[in-house]
Amino acid sequence: MRPSDSQGEKTRSQRPTVTLTWAGKQQPNTAVSPDVAAALAPLSQAGNALVQADNLDVLRFMADARIEPRLIYIDPPYATQVDHGVQSSDGAALAYSDTWEDATYCQAMFERLVLMHRVLRRDGFIFVQCDWRASAWLRVMLDEVFGRACFRNEIVWRRAPNLGRQAASAQLGRTADSIFVYSAAARTLFPGKLPQLLEPCECTREGSPIGAKWDEQAQTFFTTAPRGDYSDASIERLRSEGRVYDSGTGKVYIKYPLVRDDAGRWCKAITIDTIWTDDGVKPLRHATKRELAIDYVTQKPEALLERIVKWASEPGDLVADFFAGSGTTLAVAHSLGRRFLGVDRGEIAIQTTTNRLADTAFVRFSCDVGQQPSVQRRRPRVTRRKDASAR
Ligand SMILES: C[S@@+](CC[C@H](N)C(=O)[O-])C[C@H]1O[C@@H](n2cnc3c(N)ncnc32)[C@H](O)[C@@H]1O
């Protein structure tokens, strides 16, 4: 694992002028205890790893050992005030507690984000998924920790259709998650292509896409659109790339080359924006039987992670998920040729992930898992995935 080039370049040049505060706010203790260091030592040598531990301990160790992921994705507890359970033969077993006092939640997330910023590779990215309960807090915290200049996107992902309880409630259905994207350093380019959707074109009987023109130079069909708000300089750059079409009437159009999909159909390649409601990242309920059978409460769809991992990392990179749950990020990272590091404190999460990765080589170990802060210990609610996706 590559040592940090320069932590300095990640450091914000200006102190934030707007910050979030809560009772007892303090900077994290970054010291690693000798016991924790000994328990986590195998991490320094691991290719792929799954660790049962409080992620704060793992992050402290990583900062010390300079283990630096290229991509961090986290889907932490959302502060739903529910103890999430799974059905076991003798009743409901606690998967994880998500009951918090507001200040305790903020402090717990702040400490971890500060350390995630410290360990993230200088050319790396972090994706933080949450919903309406904590999104405002986390956004301000991320600005403070990573710097506003490192904010890249807020993605809104439709996690559930507006049906049932949601649709019948007294306000608009709460069916969206936010995913905040930050880079470790300002102006870092994403290593992967911007995610695109392929929309098949209507074709003639001979197989030519209707309304498209043939580009002899590029040997492909293309469609056109007016230049819109492209500046003259941008038009000249596009012209040098062969991307400008001059109509017979003297008007300038931008060329959009068509591409073939896996089935050989001509398609329009549409670059997506920050609203993710397309069929490529449908809510979990539309996932395959194999994926649904994993059956972990608050599990996320593999397709969602695939889009993120492809866009923000490259083969061979280390991808970390410090709230791994059922191991969705790890399974996807592995299938895309990345290395993974997953951490979860929950026994059920670790067991579920271990089963999911049965055909994968990874080291698994644990480090004493302390008590999770929780304001009230209720009987865990067996939150079915369907409910959890409409939480
Ligand atoms: C929302 S779930 C993650 C679900 C996951 N994205 C998936 O697709 O299955 C959050 C997970 O964070 C874990 N967790 C909560 N606090 C933690 C902590 N301090 N350290 C490690 N794991 C923690 C919980 O056990 C739970 O499995």
Image (spheres, helix red, strand yellow):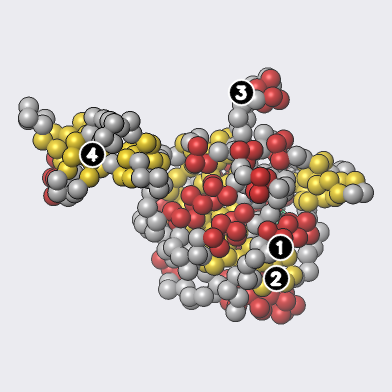
Which amino acid, mark 4? Phe
Name the residue located 69 percent from the left edge and 67 percent from the top edge.
Answer: 51
Label 1 environment density (alpha carbons within 10 Å; few <14, some 14–19, many ≥20): some
- The amino acid pointed to by label 3 is Leu
Q: Is residue 136 left or right of residue 32?
A: left
Give the structural element (helix, strand or loop) at label 4. strand
Residue 172's label in the rendered image is 3
Question: Could you say which is closer to the camera, residue 77 or residue 202?
Answer: 202
- Alpha carbon of mark 4 to alpha carbon of mark 3: how far? 41 Å
**Residue 222 — which label?**
4
CA gap, disc 3 and disc 2: 43 Å
* Number of the front mark, 4 or 1: 4
Look at mark 1 in the image and give the residue it sits on. 354
Q: Is residue 326 left or right of residue 84?
A: left
Looking at the picture, how far across and down is residue 45, in whole percent? 60, 79
Please tell me whether mark 3 sits on a helix, a strand or a loop: loop
Whether pointer 2 and pointer 1 mark residues with C-beta atoms closer than 8 Å, the reply is: yes
Quarter of the figure with the C terminus: top right
Would residue 302 be visible to someone looking at this image? yes
Residue depicted at 51% across the width and 65% down the height: 338
Viewer-side label of 3, 2: 2
